[in-house]
């Protein structure tokens, strides 16, 4: 039998035809499932959630989106599974030898990728939320908090992803402990004034030595109290607004002017 006849006989054999059918069905199923996931993610509003995040901008730069990447990831999982099944039916690959590996490895990779994507998206959104809440705080250290929140979430997401990839739990705990120590040590140095302002703000808010509408003098600045929050007090006088850190108010003392 010539090589041409052998190839032709194999291509018309039942195993090859069955493998081809499985492969085609897998392609169609993966595509349809990917489209279903894409529509489902859009229906729950994921595009609005990830809009403006760094990950979404990076995905757009690659000609896709976060929703597109997630749907493609689902479709790829189906493609890979059906390809392995087709190769097994065709006699090219023994599924029993590779299935345990893929069954254990693929879900872990899938969860690790989801953890990274979720961490990047949630980190950006959390940083934006914290930044909006601290917009009225006129202390230089306050601008570091959103960045710290964002990268802390990134770090935790990375640890979750590494854990899914079977990186040693002890190594992950050491990395986490080192990160927490760095945050506490460096944060204590960087946010010393911010923490002092916050502690002073708690005291002022609880004891209320002055309230909105009172005329006060702090140092050489006199004006009407417009707002008191956890970190600063807003005082206005003749169109000039003074934003005074609360710890400075406690340090220099308050003079309340009675009219």
Image (cartoon, helix red, strand yellow):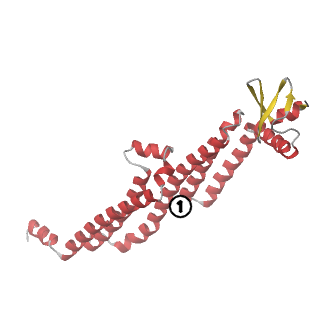
Observer-nearest of 210 and 56: 210
Residue 89 percent across, percent down from the top left: 27, 74
Q: How many marks?
A: 1
The answer to which image quadrant residue 128 occupies is top right
Pick the quarter of the image with the C terminus: top right
Crowding near the residue tagged with mark 1, few <14, some 14–19, many ≥20 C-alpha atoms within 10 Å: some
Provide residue 124's location: percent of width, then percent of height.
Answer: 56, 46
Residue lying farthest to the front in this orientation: 259
Give the percent coordinates (x, y) of residue 21.
Answer: 23, 71
Residue shown at the point (88%, 33%) measured from the top left = 251
Q: Is residue 144 left or right of residue 74?
A: right
Label 1 sits on a secondary structure element that is helix
Q: Residue furthest bottom?
A: 14
Foreground pick, 174 / 184: 184
Is 117 on the left-hand or right-hand side of 201?
A: left
Disc 1 target residue: 164
> Which residue is drawn at the image coordinates 51% and 45% (left, top)?
53
The residue at 74%/24% (across/down) is 240
Quarter of the image for residue 24 reads bottom left
Image quadrant where one finds the N terminus: bottom left
Q: Quadrant of residue 209?
A: top right
Residue 196 vs 73, above or below: the answer is: above
* Residue 230, position as x, y percentages in the image: 77, 42
Q: Is residue 100 above or below residue 236?
A: below
């Amino acid at each position: 039998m010539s090589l041409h006849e052998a190839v032709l006989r194999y291509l018309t054999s039942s195993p090859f035809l069955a493998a081809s059918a499985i492969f085609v069905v897998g392609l169609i199923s993966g595509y349809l499932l990917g489209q279903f996931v894409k529509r489902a993610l859009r229906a729950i509003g994921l595009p609005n959630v990830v809009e403006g995040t760094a990950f979404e901008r990076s995905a757009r730069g690659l000609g896709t989106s976060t929703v597109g990447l997630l749907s493609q990831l689902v479709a790829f999982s189906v493609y890979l599974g059906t390809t392995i099944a087709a190769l097994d039916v065709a006699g090219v690959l023994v599924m029993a030898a590779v299935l345990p590996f893929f069954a254990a490895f693929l879900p872990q990779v899938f969860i690790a990728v989801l953890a990274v994507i979720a961490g990047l998206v949630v980190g950006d959104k959390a940083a934006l939320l914290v930044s909006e809440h601290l917009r009225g705080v006129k202390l230089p250290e306050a601008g570091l908090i959103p960045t710290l929140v964002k990268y802390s979430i990134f770090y935790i997401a990375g640890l979750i992803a590494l854990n899914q990839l079977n990186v040693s739990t002890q190594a992950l705990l050491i990395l986490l402990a080192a990160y927490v120590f760095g945050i506490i040590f460096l944060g204590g140095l960087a946010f010393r004034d911010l923490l002092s302002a916050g502690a002073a703000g708690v005291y002022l808010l609880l004891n209320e030595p002055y309230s909105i509408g009172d005329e006060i003098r702090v140092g050489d600045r006199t004006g009407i109290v417009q707002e008191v929050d956890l970190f600063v007090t807003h005082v206005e006088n003749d169109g000039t607004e003074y934003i005074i850190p609360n710890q400075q108010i406690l340090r220099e003392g308050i003079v309340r002017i009675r009219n």
